[in-house]
Amino acid sequence: MRDATSENEPLGIRSMRSFFKHKNVITKDKGRLRLFGKPSIVFVDGITDMDLTAEKLLNKLDLPQKIERIAVKMNLCDYRRPETGAVSDPQVLESLLRGLRKKYPDSAISIVENDATSVSADRMIRYLGIDKISEKYSAEVVNLAHGKWITKQIDGYFTKSIEVPVILEDCDLLITHPKLKTHSMTKITCGLKNMFGCYRRKQKVKFHKFLDEAIVDINLALKPNVSIVDANICMEGIGGPCYGFPIKLGLMIAGKDVVAVDAFCARLIGFRPWFVGHIRKAASKDIGHLSYELSDCFNLGDKKLYHFEFDRTLYYLMKLSRTSGGFA
Amino acid sequence: MIRGAIIGCGKVASQRHMPCYRMMKNVEIVAVCDTSEKEARAFSRRNNIPSMYTEINDLFEKENLDFVDICTTPSTHYSICSNAIDHGLNVLVEKPVALSLEETLVLRDKSESRKVKVCPIHNYRFKENVLKATQMCKEGRVGKILKIMSIVHSSGPFPDWFWNEETTGGFLYESAIHFIDLQLMLCGDYNKVICLHKDFSEELKITTGISALVEYKSGTIGIIDVNAFSSSIYTHLDIFGTASNIHLKFFPEYFSTSLGPFTPYAEFKSENKRFFGYARAALFGLKKYNRDYHLRLLLEFVKAIESGHDVPVTINSIIPTMRLLEDLKKKDSVCMST
């Protein structure tokens, strides 16, 4: 169900409305928009040995000693090769799986992805050889589209009830494992946006008119416990999430607060988190904190070197054409 | 001061190389040599060069030189280059360094045994747009190169010596060599020519067109489309990678990349750049354009002589190019099925 107040209103007005709505929330319910609360901890490590980095980050995250069911949500948005930075890198995924299996030898690990507008998850999994990797670590690969779904009630921006995959609802540890990329509509795509792939509908392009809100809603329904960002080979440019130039940052970023991790990633690549709609709105809905603290951080050096190319003129032109021309 | 001599006083020497030498403070051209005394005299007078020769051996024996720059017609490159190596001189030689792979290998072995540097002038490697493309490929921003396509459609004027394909190598060795060389520079050595089609003019006894499909060792597929008598001058090099594509145009130079849908805005932006490049060329003359990439190569060559490092284009690096050219020249049209 869509929010009746926002129906038939242009996106800009809706955003402003929701902004003021949440300003009210701050005054009424102190501390809901926890901008200045206790910051969440984000871990950053440079990749020298991929296995070691993944293992180190998993240990730093202070996860429970015993977990029965773990689900890792990959990022397979289009038929692209891993060297493009557009899709999950099987090598990084393998390191993560190795680390998880070492830490949790008896847990049931599922690597999950859903069909998207232009992608069949099954084919992409085979294309990248993820099925073979998961077999190696006794993990199962699940295409969410073939699984069971249940309806969940949420207090969302865009909808009040949402269908979610049972496997993700039932798991004890949900890890969002995105690629760090720029996005033609949301500026950045990271942990929060990765969960957008969990909408049941295959034609997710239909949600693009309310993308920020839709991202927040799915994260309200399926809040990831951990975000482990593959920022090794990333993607920059205005063509994201599928088309862009690969850029190597050689980093792996993790945290228990998906909003804080996204906020750090946004800042790292040259965006102010507050001005990234879905991050701001996710913070408003208490999914996580906008403020973060780097713990035991790898020496990043000159941070400007990490800034991604992003043609802002074209971004606003495209935004205008979408608003006035009705392009998705 | 590095002392050099120019052999061959034609258009390439006067319009391309000499303006570069004039800009280089550590190089002095002390002599010129041309079989035509009139040409040599005029060239030396125009450029204030103290000595001129009509005999190459006289030049080699009488002058104390660090290098020679061979700008003669293609059929003479091998013999002059070989002679210069025998005299222990470093050599800068216009492309093609020789008209066969065998001769190229002889020059390589000779230069290695005499410990002299030979630099074939494959100057397109130093064009600004090519340098950008090379950099992007090295950085992995193109991903894996899947296909590379060279289209070289040209039309005259062709010099008199061009028409004898036996002695010059024709259009393939004169113009297409640059674009074939760029393919090999970006994709590495090749496996085989998968198929080939040749247009041969019986009347003129020259090859007027070559279309070929080449398989590189890296798995890249190369498409070569060379045409001498075309309705337009259309010279493109397109690189299609897994991550992004690069489009290069020449005369004037153009560089653009494409990802996903090619929007009118992106097209406008890159064509706009080309337009201003064209306007700059029209305002300041094409000389600067032609000089810049020659200058980059010549500067690197002189630096290599001074420092003892490798020259910017080694004979070893052009051997795959010479082998592919020979394959394209010698093979008849081949097709996978009839």
Image (tube, coloured by chain):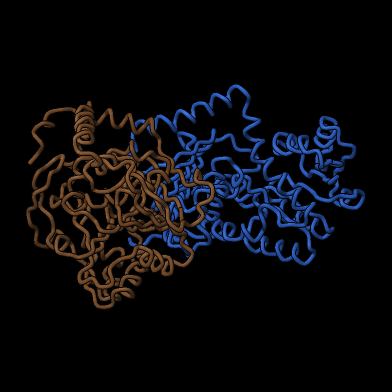
Chain colours: A brown, B blue
> Along the line of sight, which residue is nearer the eye, B173 or A192?
A192
- Residue sitting farthest toward the right: B62
Outermost residue toward the bottom in this view: A106
- Viewer-nearest residue: B306 or B81: B306
Please tell me how many numbered marks the rendered image carries: 0
Percent across and percent down for residue B22 are: 78, 35
Q: Residue furthest top?
A: B283
- The answer to which of B263 and B333 lies nearer the viewer is B263
x 20%, y 52%: residue:
A116
Image quarter (top left, top right, bottom left or bottom right) of the N terminus of chain A: top left
Q: Residue at 63%, 48% (x, y): give it.
A: B122
Q: Position of residue A232 (x, y in %)?
A: 42, 57
Please name the residue shown 20% across and 35% down the image: A25
Quadrant of the image occupied by residue A111: bottom left
Percent of width and height locating residue B40 = 82, 37
Q: Is residue A140 visible?
A: yes
Residue drawn 84% across the image and 49% down it: B56
A117 left or right, relative to B43: left
Image quadrant for the C terminus of chain A? top left
Would residue B205 be visible to someone looking at this image? no
Is B300 displayed left or right of A188 in the figure?
Answer: right
Say whether residue A20 is left or right of residue A275: left
Q: Position of residue B297 (x, y in %)?
A: 68, 45
Note whether A63 is above or below A197 in the view shown: below
